[in-house]
Every structure is written in C-alpha cells, then in structure tokens.
Amino acid sequence: MTIREYTRWRSESVKCRDSMRATFSSAFLRGEERAVRFLPADFRDPAARRQAAERAARRPQPVSPELLAALREQEQTLSPSAARKANLEALAQPGTAVVVTGQQVGLFLGPLYTFYKAASAIAFARQLQAETGVRCVPLFWLQTEDHDFEEIRRCHSPAPDGTSLELALEPGSSDESQTRVSVAHRRLGSEITGQLEALEEALGRLPHAGPMLALFREHYRPGQSLGLAFAGVLSALFADEGLLFLNPRCAAIAKLAAPIYRRSIVEADQIAAVLQARSAALCAVGFDEQVAVRPGTTLVFFHDSVDGPRYRLERSRDQWTTPHARSGGAGESLSNEALLAILDSQPLRFSTSALLRPIVQDTLLPTAAYVGGPGELNYFAQLQPLYELFGVAQPLAVLRARFRCIEENTQALLRKLGLHASDAELPRAELLRRLSAQLLDKVAEGACDGAPLAPEAVRAWLLDEVEQRLTQLGEKQSGLRDAVQRTRVSIERNVNRLVGRYERIQLERDQTLSERVDRLQHALLPAGVPQERHYALPYFIGKYGIQGFKQQVLGSLEATGLATAGVRELEL
C-alpha cells in the first residue's frame, strides 16, 4: 500500500468511524456478533478458560533458561517473598501456565486500576487453576519501555477533608530527545522527598498512615529508578500472593526478543498489510481502530543509544530513518543490513510498540490469559492476524475487575438522596432533574411538605382566587372599585414579598441539593472520570490498611470470579 493509498484508506476509515462510532469492548461484553467474531474466545465461558489453560500448559517449548535466569536476577531487587519464589520455580516446570497483566510504572503506582489489574491477575490465575488443575501463576509485565513520562509523572489522592491532592514529579527537560527516553532509564530526583512530605501532611492522620508512608518512602526515594520504585511497592503489596514481575528493559530479555524484532523489520510490509486489513474489517462494522498502523513503519522502536531516546523506524525507499534521533535533529538513515547488524550486536537498542509487546510476551511465556482494561480489549481485537503471522497462540483476553469504593459518608449520602452509586455517572444537570422529579412525586403522595414549584407558579396560585373575588366585588358594588383597586395593589405587594421569601427558601433547598450532588460526584466520579482512573492507592491503604483493603478487593474477586463484567462496589 502506497502512502497515497493509505491516506485515502485512512480518510475513508475516519468517515466510517464517525458514522458508526462504537467501542469494541462494550459490544464484546454485550455479546454482539459483530464483535465476537474478532475475539471469539470469551473469558466468561468456562470451556474457553479451560482451553486456554490447557493450551498454555501443553506448550512444546517451556520457559527458556535465559528468561528464568533474568527473572531470578530481577527477583533479587524486589521485596522478599516465599510465595513469589515458589511461583518462579513452578514457572521453570513444564505444564505451568501464566496469567499476565501489565501497566506503565507511574508515581505511587499511578491510578487505582493498576492495583485492581494485579489483583485481577492473581484471582484469575487461582480461578483457572481451581477449574482446570493446571498450575497457573500470575505475572505483572512492567511497561518500562514506554517513554510517555508526562502521562505517568502525577497522581491524585482524596484527602480526609473532602478535597483532592495532586502529587507530581518535575516534568523534566522539554528537549524532545529527553522526552522520548524509556521510563526504565529515569531516576527519581530530590523532588520525590517533597511529594512524600505532601502525602504525609495530607494523609498522615489516617489510621494506617504509618505503614503506608513507610512503604512508599522505602521504594520511592531519590536516585531510585522509577521502574524499581513501582515494582518494589507492588511486589510488597502482593508478596503473600506470589505475584511475579518481568521488566523487559534488560539485555537478556532484549536478546530473547531479538528474533521477533528482526521479523518485524524484515516483514514490515506484510505485517502492516494484515493489520490494516484487520482495521478496515473492524471499521466496516462500526469499531474504532484503537492503535493506528501506518505503512512504511515497523512495530519496533529504535533507540539512539541503549539508554537514549527511542523513535519509530520509518522507511524511505531502501533506507530506514529515525527522525530526530540525534541531538542535531538530522536523524539517521540505515540500510536493512546495517539495522539488523545493530540488532544482532545491541538488541537493547530496540523495544516494542503496543501491538508488538503481546507477541513478545506470549512468545517468551506460556500465557493462558492477559488481564487488561477496556482499551486493551479494544486493541486485542486487532491482534489475531499478527498472532497467526508469528505462529503464536493468542491467549484469552480478560477484562480486569472494575471497582467503585463507597465509603460510609458516601453511603449515607446515597441513602439520603435515594440514589444508587451508578447514578453518580449521570450528567450533573440530569441527576438534579431526576432528584427534583422524585421530590415532586413525594409531594404528590403527601410524603413531604412544600411543593417545589416555580416562584411564578406560586404567585399565580396565590393571586388567582383573590383576583377573581375582588373582580366580582368591584362589579357588584361600583362604589367599591377604588377600594378594590387599592386592596389589589396591597395584596399583590404582600404576595410578592411572600413569593420572594419562598424563592429564597427554594434556592437554599436547591443549593443544598446541588451541594450534595457535587459531593457525591466528587467522591464517585472525581474530575468526571471513574475513581479508579483518577485516584491513586495511598489514601485507601492509609485509611483501611494494606491487608484490609487488599482483602476487600481479593474477597470480592474470589466470591464472583472475573466473569462479572460490571463495576463492583466496595462498601468500605
């Protein structure tokens, strides 16, 4: 496909997307046929779960000794865990399957859904093992190759006083070459001390603040790499559950991934063609393309140096170019042979894109399932042709558990308003209209005093009867017309005063209702997004304890499994 053909295809795709915009994951979870054909194995189907676990267990080639050695070396940097060591030894045995999840390595673990992902992988591994008898271990893939530091450098926390706290690392250099360095090579600076102090100032009086602050201080410290800080905290939180960790940004794992990188370069045109055909098929039935694929590029990134900025490789005629790869901005052009020679000698100068990472992951590991969010389910729909091209079995795509934390004060507010927690997702204006309508219903039933009518309606209601009587009196007694008129003016003046007072009371009532709605939405939908996408973990383990909060989450998962695709409610 030429650039011109691609441009025309993309234009048609955008038109199609705009006319039939839909989310693949939501359609898949509803069981729509148009979605199911792109991802035929459903994680909610016991037969599909059994097939995925048994297929992974029958994998002809077990985990390589080189990968095991790399994992054991990385294990030494984590919090001690007998359960993790046992799972690592199980991984060395044939017949063991893996349930994988992963996430970017954010400040103080980033959004809450990172914690939920890890818990979901643990719960699903346990579920698969209980259902099938196949030994299953959970593993967290640390996405340290990614370079989007701006996305991960800040987090938010609720505070006990009802406000919200923003914590952030310094943005760093604005130089593009520095912004494109993998986060694996970023180290925490002295500003992390100030962020820990801000965390203590805001949350230090919570019942379990001491262990929470000690945990983050131990790992998020000046000089520590962002990836190790993240892994250190998460490994401590799930030490008893044996959650394994894999950091792909190391020489040994890059060497194991090198054959996949090679194919991605050599077969770039074929790979782009099958992915574009898949995207076109998805668009034809109304789904967005989650990850765009362009002709003339590869699915690998090329690093200027091992710890330098990374850029997508682009081909111009018979040369591969790395735009702005040098500080001078001129870039670098390499022939296929020269590029492959660098790959052979320095595989760590290459890293994966979002679409290639699953192929590397499932080539190296006996993956039965990958646990991801709705967005990851969307791009899993693009991947089947790529798995087939690389000769790798596509694992089960599992939706991570989604939670809504409902604290006691929020529970009381919901009861007072007569709402369900999910109602907080409604637009504010619609929610206020619903509550006003409910109040009118109660008035009609005599369940409460005072109808919340508009002030003009109250004025008309008060004056209509009086006006009718005064008019009749004036018509019957012509000598009273002037007195009737004066009385009318007096009554209107007093009614206006009464209506004014009514209006002020009504405004106060509306303001109270508005404030309650605002508190509810701030608690359950902060910044207009679900809690799990905005708030970070520290507040919740500071208030409810590390074990207390974790067991609430795991207990919910163990009670229902991951077959429940809806949002779960944790009443804390």
Image (spheres, rainbow, N blue to C red):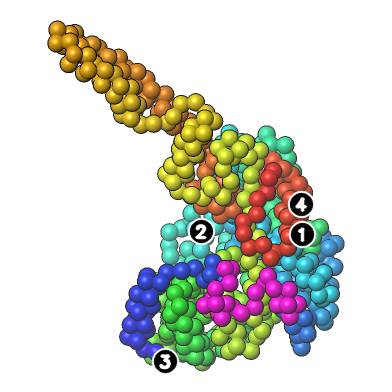
**Which one is closest to the eye, mark 1 or mark 4?**
1
**Which one is closest to the eye, mark 4 or mark 3?**
4
Label 2 – label 4 distance at C-alpha: 29 Å
Query: Which residue is under mark 1?
Result: 558
**Going from the N terminus, do you reach mark 4 or mark 3 first?**
3
**Which one is closest to the eye, mark 3 or mark 1?**
1
Task: From the top left corner, tell me how far across and down residue 365 is, in percent.
Answer: 71, 78
Q: Which mark is drawn over residue 551?
A: 4
Front residue (pair 62, 247): 62
Front residue (pair 430, 41): 430
**Quarter holding the C terminus?**
top right
Q: Which residues are magenta?
A: 29-51
**Going from the N terminus, do you reach mark 2 or mark 4 first?**
2
**Which one is closest to the eye, mark 2 or mark 4?**
4
**Quarter holding the N terminus?**
bottom left
Query: Which residue is under mark 3?
Result: 318
**Going from the N terminus, do you reach mark 1 or mark 4 first?**
4
Task: From the top left corner, tell me how far across and down residue 112 is, in percent.
Answer: 62, 53
Label 1 – label 4 distance at C-alpha: 10 Å
Label 2 – label 1 distance at C-alpha: 32 Å
**Going from the N terminus, do you reach mark 2 or mark 1 first?**
2
Query: Quick check: can you spot residue 214?
Result: no
Front residue (pair 553, 211): 553
Front residue (pair 352, 468): 468
